[in-house]
Structure formats: structure tokens, C-alpha cells
Amino acid sequence: MLKIRNVKMEDLAELVVIEQLCFTKEEAATKEAFEKRIQVIPDSFFVAEATGEIVGLVNGPVIDKAYITDDLFSDLNANPASGGHQSILGLAVSPHFQKRGVASALLSYFEKEAMAKGRETITLTCKADLIQFYEKHGYLNKGVSASVHGGVIWYNMIKNLQ
């Protein structure tokens, strides 16, 4: 049974482990980045728990542009109460729990929360191998992103909520 809830500072150590298992050193959010996100945007940072253990996470700030820019990985502001574009900076699932619908459950929960707050879109970047996954969830591929995060090629994916 999967439980999705808002992040708490006590989750930090587990989140860092999952992030490091899912992303390269260059791509992964640091402990400091997670600390800042937990403090500044806990309203758009969720974790998935199975049997009391954190198995996945999704997070990102609300931004005023439709696409993610690399400065978001370091500069963070509190989310507006409503409107804007909900970004996803990170969606990660513990390898042991992958291919079990955890990422899909996190995405759909995230989307419901974003819609409840009147966000215009959900926007994210992903690598080529994940384009199909996001398209299955209603995201549109808007081509190669300007992002150079982690030294890899990212694609802009966007889902209209209105």
C-alpha cells in the first residue's frame, strides 16, 4: 500500500540515498539542495512511502515561465498560492520499487495538487529514454531544452492543466 505525503525534514537522509541511486553525481540534487527545497517548497515536495519506508519522491518549485532553466537548481523562492507553472526538478523511485507504478502515482498526486492550486501547466525536463513514459501521462515533448544540467541532453516536457 502506497502512501503519498508532504516531505518532512526527517526524510532528508533517505531522499539523498534515493536521489543518488537514480541520478549520476552531476545530475543528482545535493543534500543542501534538498534541505533548501524542504524548507522553501514543502507544499510541492512529496514522498511515497511503502511499509513505512520512503520509496520515491517528486519535487519542484512553481515558476513564472513554461520551461525549466538551470538557475532553478540553485535559486529557489516560495511558491505563490495560486497560478504559475508547476515544475518538476526531480522524480525518483528507489530501484527496488521501480516498475511498480510508484512514479505514476507520484505524478498523478502531484498533478491533482497543482490543479487544486490553479497552476497552468506542469513542466519538466527528461532524458530521451523517458520521453515515452511522460507522453503516456499526457505530457507533450517540446524538443531539446536549453538546460545543460549534468552535462546531458534534456527534453522539455509540458502538460497543460487548464
Image (cartoon, grey):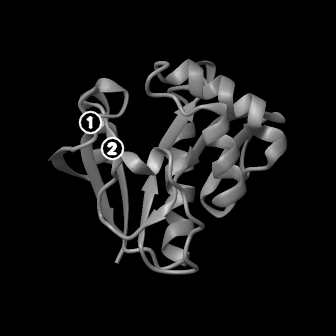
Crowdedness near tag 2: few (<14), some (14–19) or many (≥20) residues, C-alpha within 10 Å: many
Q: Secondary structure at mark 2?
A: strand
Q: Residue at x 66, y 37 (%)?
A: 32
The image quadrant of residue 96 is: top right
Identify residue type, mark 1. Answer: Trp
Q: Residue at x 35, y 34 (%)?
A: 149
Q: Is residue 134 above or below residue 53?
A: below
Position of 84 with respect to 103 (left or right) is: left
Q: Is residue 13 above or below residue 137?
A: above
Which residue position is annotated with label 2?
125
For the residues labelled 2 and 1, say whether their Cβ atoms are less than 8 Å apart: yes
Position of 31 with respect to 155 (left or right) is: right
Q: Residue furthest left?
A: 143
Give how far across and how far down residue 110 sits, in percent.
54, 58
The answer to whether residue 11 of the structure is visible from this angle is yes
Give how far across and how far down residue 15 sits, in percent.
68, 33
The image quadrant of residue 152 is: top left
Res. 154 mark: 1
Identify residue type, mark 2. Answer: Thr
Q: Secondary structure at mark 1?
A: loop
Give how far across and how far down residue 118 sits, in percent.
47, 80
Position of 150 with respect to 153 (left or right) is: right
Q: Which quadrant: the C terminus?
A: bottom left
Q: Residue at x 32, y 33 (%)?
A: 130
Question: Observer-nearest residue: 46 or 134?
Answer: 46
